[in-house]
């Protein structure tokens, strides 16, 4: 039986402490009598129920720390709906509003904000490689106006392929598919471990770059033309926004696929493995609280995920003619019948 959670044994930086217990919450939230302003930039559509749940956890966490929207803080939320142009427009808008701190989701949204301000504190979530893309100088001491929470480690590129071969041992050709515009980090962050795993499993690997649903269909259809094709979908906002056609095309062409987020498996994908994004949003609230109390992002270490979720969809596996090992089913946090 393989070890499906190597990340859990690692020691991550989790310095969330430091809230003075002697400060009453309400007093701390209004220490200077001024309502604070928190900007939030979400890359998804406002109708995305999963994204709304994530945001609600962040807002709930703020309330537990004494920050209540409409009373001592104003929360300005902008939804980019997967559009790069809207992301840049809303980033500038949140900066022009003179937000006291901005929470941003995803690498493209964080990059847009970084272009517009080097002074307003930014807390990012669900960013894969903040050092590699230039958001921070280092994880223990970010050094600028950004800090936050890493989404995944680069070694997951290989772990995804390993899990895929466990559930679909017949895979002989595998593609890792992403949009280079929304996941510019993927080639240097996830691909090396994916290709190393492919070599060890004697699998032919392909890096598939996509910019449209037509290109997505071309990639998945080519994998399904003959038996043995498999698909790895790494962390990418574009893939999340387009997860419905990706899942549908994988089913239509009988291509087993593994995804980075549990929402894919919930929506019909074969299996997913990745951090609990709701937990990441929940952990972001104390960082925003600390910044509003005067701490600097440069002094708050970037943190890695602490909770990973493996989800299996038995209905999809059956449709693909796959038998999921019972040990793997037992290890999964959730199995969709």
Image: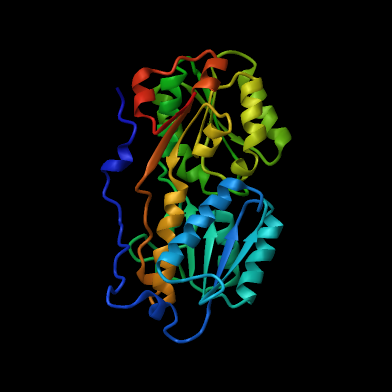
Q: Residue at x 47, y 21 (%)?
A: 203
Which x, y percent locates residue 179? 62, 43
Which x, y percent locates residue 295? 38, 75
**Which sits in the foreground, 266 or 12?**
266
Q: Residue at x 30, y 52 (%)?
A: 12
Q: Specify the quadrant that holds the N terminus.
A: top left
**How is this picture coloured?**
rainbow
Q: Which residue is drawn at 51% across and 77% down?
A: 72
- Horizontal arrangement in the rendering, residue 318 relative to residue 297 (left or right): right
The quadrant holding residue 283 is: bottom left
Q: Residue at x 49, y 18 (%)?
A: 171
Which x, y percent locates residue 153? 40, 45
Which x, y percent locates residue 101? 51, 72
Kindly tell me whether residue 202 is visible in this rendering: no
Kindly tell me whether residue 235 is visible in this rendering: yes
Query: How many circles with numbers are drawn on the protein?
Result: 0
- Horizontal arrangement in the rendering, residue 90 relative to residue 132 (left or right): right
Q: In this view, does 274 lie above or below 197?
A: below
> Residue reaching furthest bottom?
32
**Which sits in the foreground, 80 or 334?**
334
- Horizontal arrangement in the rendering, residue 266 relative to residue 163 (left or right): right
Q: In this view, does 280 lie above or below 266?
A: below
> Residue reaching furthest right?
214
């Amino acid at each position: 039986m393989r070890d499906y959670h190597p990340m859990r044994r690692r020691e991550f930086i989790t310095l969330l402490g430091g809230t003075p217990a002697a400060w009453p919450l309400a007093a701390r939230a209004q220490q200077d009598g001024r309502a604070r302003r928190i900007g939030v930039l979400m890359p998804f559509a406002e109708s995305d129920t999963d994204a709304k749940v994530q945001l609600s956890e962040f807002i709930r966490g703020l309330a537990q720390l004494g920050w209540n929207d409409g009373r001592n803080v104003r929360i300005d939320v902008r939804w980019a709906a997967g559009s790069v142009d809207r992301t840049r427009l809303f980033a500038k808008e949140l900066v022009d509003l003179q937000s006291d701190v901005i929470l941003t989701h995803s690498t493209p949204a964080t990059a847009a904000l970084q272009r517009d301000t080097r002074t307003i504190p930014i807390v990012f979530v669900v960013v894969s490689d903040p050092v590699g893309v230039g958001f921070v100088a280092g994880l223990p001491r970010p050094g600028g106006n950004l800090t936050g929470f890493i989404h995944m480690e680069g070694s997951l590129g290989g772990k995804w392929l390993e899990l895929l071969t466990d559930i679909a041992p017949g895979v002989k050709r595998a593609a890792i598919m992403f949009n280079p515009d929304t996941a510019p980090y993927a080639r240097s962050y996830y691909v090396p471990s994916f290709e190393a795993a492919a070599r060890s499993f004697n699998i032919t690997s392909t890096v598939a770059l996509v910019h449209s649903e037509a290109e997505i269909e071309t990639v998945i259809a080519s994998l399904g033309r003959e038996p043995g094709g498999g698909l790895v979908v790494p962390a990418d906002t574009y893939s999340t926004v387009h997860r419905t056609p990706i899942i549908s095309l994988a089913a239509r062409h009988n291509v087993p696929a593994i995804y980075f987020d549990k929402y894919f498996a919930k929506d019909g994908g074969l299996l997913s493995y990745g951090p609990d994004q709701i937990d990441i949003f929940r952990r972001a609230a104390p960082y925003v609280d600390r910044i509003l109390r005067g701490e600097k992002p440069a002094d708050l270490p970037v943190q890695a995920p602490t909770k990973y979720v493996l989800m299996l969809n038995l209905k999809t596996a059956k449709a693909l003619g796959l038998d999921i090992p019972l040990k793997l089913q037992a290890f999964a946090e959730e199995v969709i019948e």
